[in-house]
Amino acid sequence: ICSDLSRRLFDKFLDARYSWVKSQQPQEITYAINQGSQFLVIGIIGQGMLFVSDLVILIVFFLILFWLNFLSTVVVTVVLVLVIYLYSRKIKVAITNSSNELLRSTISGQEATLDIIKMWREIRIQNRHKFAVGKFSKFRESASRSFAIGSWLQQFPKAAFEIFGLLIT
């Protein structure tokens, strides 16, 4: 979704009036096309959904633990500590790699976007629209994939804790 939105924004940018393009700050355009769409889709909508689901799960979980006994609470706490330990040893490396790829893709995408903005008029005159969109999309797809993998990996400990908690209840 993020890469498609970025691609559509970029496509619209290439069709924009010359006077409008020249009146805009290149950094603002690159941010809006690259990170802006990503933060909009994943950041706001995704975090809102996570907040609601976490709140519901937390309420249900505490009600179940209240209904059960203290021993269940201790077991779930031990599992949580184990998951945090495994997380810090194994998943942290994958998150670091994903974050590094996200950074590389984002920077490369911004550089490509700035280059294309500088050549905007030539791209329009020479009808190189598809080439520019293809170059741009390559970096956005990589950045979106890395962001999604990193986000998923960061949710793993919480999900493991919740699943185990529900299984023992």
Image: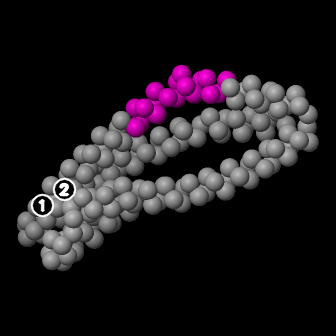
Q: Would residue 4 be seen by someone viewing this image from the given angle?
A: no
Q: Position of residue 48 (x, y in %)?
A: 59, 58
Asked whether the beta carbons under mark 1 and mark 2 sit within 8 Å of each other, the answer is yes
The amino acid sitting under disc 1 is Lys
Q: In the image, 155: left or right of 165?
A: left
Q: Position of residue 108 (x, y in %)?
A: 24, 45
Q: Position of residue 133 (x, y in %)?
A: 24, 59
**Mark 1: which secondary structure?**
helix
Q: Dot 1, crowdedness within 10 Å: few (<14), some or many (≥20)?
A: few
Q: Which residue is mark 2?
A: 114
Where is residue 169, by image quadrant?
A: top right
Q: In the image, 166: left or right of 144?
A: right
Residue shown at 20% from the left, 50% from the top: 111
Residue shown at 15% from the left, 71% from the top: 22
**Mark 2: which secondary structure?**
helix
Q: Which residue is mark 1?
A: 118
Residue 17 higher or lower than 135, as above or below = below
Between the residue at mark 1 and the residue at mark 2, the CA separation in whole angstroms equals 6 Å
Highlighted range, magenta:
82-99
Residue 87 on the magenta segment: yes
Residue 30 higher or lower than 71, as above or below = below
The amino acid sitting under disc 2 is Leu
Q: In the image, 126: left or right of 166?
A: left
